[in-house]
């Protein structure tokens, strides 16, 4: 079987084992069903996720022009504290920014390589945790807009990490921690205007990834530079495909690449 399409972040479904899917345009694959199969991957060309032109991808699946133009790549996405829609101030497209920013947001703790703080829209729970490869997570506060979530994250990351060590996450070099205890310890550092949104008596969510074999020394595949790759898929965690030879491929980091996938 052979498929060709532009890579986009894999949609997921939380069940006993997380289910992963790959939207290839005319085909929609359940990636879990490809486990223990040999895949041939090859780079075909670029296709910007915004203008759909064949231009080199700059960041987040967008060409350089679109990255600095589309509201889907505004600074407030990576830095929620820069959100201004609640003030009626436009960054790139006020209607889009109101739609995205003026909805319930969650500040959470997730444990993937270590305990980290993060922000996501409420409707993205638990998708955001899955994408980060977290095996456990807990919600700290639920606020009505992205700005309040952002200033909470800024305050808390003075006391807890805000980054994931992707190598450690993929090696499954992790330890279980008491996130309820972490939530309580961090409560005093939540900004005063957010204290009323603290979630009392919350419990952890556990997530289980479809991985048959974790890599001891994960090595990242650069498909553009290498051109093609063949390997046996043995796991999926976060947005990574894990292969038997310890090669790992970050699907999300390669959004905007048109690829051929051949399944042996």
Image (cartoon, rainbow, N blue to C red):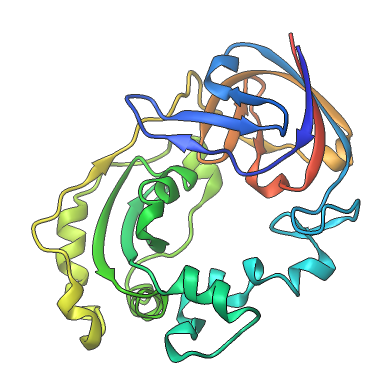
The number of numbered badges drawn on the structure is 0
For residue 250, side relative to residue 179 (left or right): right
**Residue 100 at x, y percent in the picture:** 48, 68
Q: Residue at x 80, y 43 (%)?
A: 257
Q: Is residue 147 above or below residue 11?
A: below
**The N terminus is located in which quarter?**
top right
Judge by depth and name the residue closer to the eye, 247 or 5: 5
Toward the front, the furthest residue is 95
Task: Identify the image quadrant of residue 93.
Answer: bottom right
Judge by depth and name the residue closer to the eye, 213 or 252: 252
Q: Is residue 255 above or below residue 64?
A: above
Judge by depth and name the residue closer to the eye, 11 or 165: 11
**Residue 132 at x, y percent in the picture:** 47, 48
Toward the left, the furthest residue is 201
Q: Residue at x 36, y 46 (%)?
A: 126
**Residue 56 at x, y percent in the picture:** 88, 55
Task: Identify the image quadrant of residue 9.
Answer: top right
Q: Residue at x 47, y 42 (%)?
A: 169
């Amino acid at each position: 079987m052979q498929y060709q399409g532009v890579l986009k972040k894999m949609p997921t479904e939380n069940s006993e084992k997380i289910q992963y899917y790959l939207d290839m345009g005319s085909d929609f694959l359940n990636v879990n069903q490809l486990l223990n199969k040999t895949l041939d991957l090859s780079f075909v060309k670029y296709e910007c996720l915004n203008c759909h032109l064949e231009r080199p991808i700059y960041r987040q699946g967008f060409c350089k022009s679109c990255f600095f133009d589309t509201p889907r790549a505004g600074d407030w996405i990576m830095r929620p504290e820069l959100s201004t829609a609640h003030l009626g101030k436009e960054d790139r497209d006020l209607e889009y920014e109101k739609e995205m920013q003026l909805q319930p947001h969650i500040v959470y703790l997730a444990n993937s390589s270590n305990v980290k703080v993060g922000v996501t829209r409420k409707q993205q729970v638990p998708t955001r945790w899955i994408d980060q490869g977290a095996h456990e997570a807990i919600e700290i506060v639920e606020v009505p807009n992205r700005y309040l979530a952002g200033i909470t994250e800024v305050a808390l990351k003075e006391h807890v990490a805000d980054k994931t060590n992707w190598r450690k996450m993929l090696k499954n070099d992790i330890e279980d921690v008491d996130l309820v205890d972490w939530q309580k310890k961090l409560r005093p550092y939540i900004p005063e205007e957010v204290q009323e949104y603290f979630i009392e008596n919350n419990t952890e969510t556990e997530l289980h990834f479809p991985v048959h074999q974790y890599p001891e020394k994960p090595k990242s595949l650069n498909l553009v530079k290498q051109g093609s790759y063949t390997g046996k898929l043995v796991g999926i965690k976060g947005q990574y495909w894990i292969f038997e030879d310890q090669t790992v491929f970050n699907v999300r980091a390669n959004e905007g690449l048109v690829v051929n996938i051949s399944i042996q």
